[in-house]
Amino acid sequence: MASKLASRQEAKRLEELLFAEWAEKKRIIEDEINKVVNTQMSEGDLVNVARYISEGGKRFRGFLTILTAEALGGSIDDALDAAVAIELVQAASLAIDDIIDKDVERRGKAAAWIKHGLPKTVLSSLLFIPVSQRIVEKLGFRAIFHVIRAWEATVRGEILDSFLPRLVPASRYLELCKLKTGSLFKLATILGAISAGASVEVESKMGEYGETLGVLYQVADDVVDYHNYKVGLKPYEPGLKHFESWARNQGPDPVEVGLRFLAEKLDYVSNLLDTIEFKSEKAVLLYFIPEFMVSKMLEEAGLDRRLRELRATN
């Protein structure tokens, strides 16, 4: 559907369509999250903590859930519960991540553990997980199963990255990307497919699409951070050591290695979508999102042009 190198005019049209769809779904998702928090997490002051943890954010994963469902013939109503579930899991992950990393700010305000203390933040975050499972109960066992697996993967990734870094050799960098970032993107697209009543085969392919999208996001983020370190714009962060080790195993320039990987994976994910029979023209956004996301991230460091060059030669 989407050409590998879309014209600027077409890219602009798709960008406008993407943001219009995203804004509409974001509003709907946020309204529903507020309802869930107010009705299912209403124990005393806990509701205020839950509201604080869950408010804000781009709601991209929830949007991706609904977009996947619509592309496969489902509707917003079919996928809304799943979209809320993935956003609650994401919110819990971020709140706990802030505690582990001792980050004092999140989304331009005090982190939840700073605002409400450790006990309330931890308990509220943990409660988000079974609430998310209960929300998707009507979608069946596979939906609950995937919520559990995604949370397990996220926690295992955090454990490896934060407490057992020596167990993450260069060869496991991409595995770490899948666990830490890819798992929740994968959950978003799988729940979207399940919501639309898609086959297990399509569900699996959409899960691979989501996971790859998450890996693209993490690698692009690391490429930009490493580039900015090399040009003196920011210090070397501990998390970059995994990326640098992996990249140097494949070439002398980590930035170039990362860009080549991104170019190859963007082609791969487009070819993967070609194997799925979609039922809505909105599927064009699934093709557009990976390239748009990666290009916008690289634009910050002026690396988007080099990515286009690499994609043109593939």
Image (cartoon, rainbow, N blue to C red):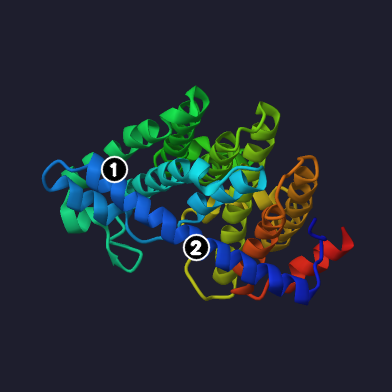
User: Total marks drawn?
Assistant: 2
Residue 11 pos. (x, y %): 73, 70
Instruction: Indicate whether 299 appears above or below 156.
Output: below
Residue 70 pos. (x, y %): 61, 48
Residue 261 pos. (x, y %): 73, 53
**Which residue does the image show at 80% across and 47% down from the upper left?**
271
Q: Which residue is mark 2?
A: 24
Q: Nearer the viewer, residue 198 or 299?
A: 198
Query: Three-letter amino acid code at disc 1?
Result: Ser
Give SS at disc 1: helix
Q: From where the camera sits, is residue 99 visible? A: no
Q: Quadrant of the C terminus?
A: bottom right
Left or right: 270, with 147 as reference point: right
Q: Nearer the viewer, residue 111 or 141?
A: 141
Q: Nearer the viewer, residue 302 or 67?
A: 67
**Which residue does the image show at 38% across and 56% down from the upper left?**
30
Q: Which residue is mark 1?
A: 125
Instruction: Indicate whether 234 appears above or below 40.
Output: below
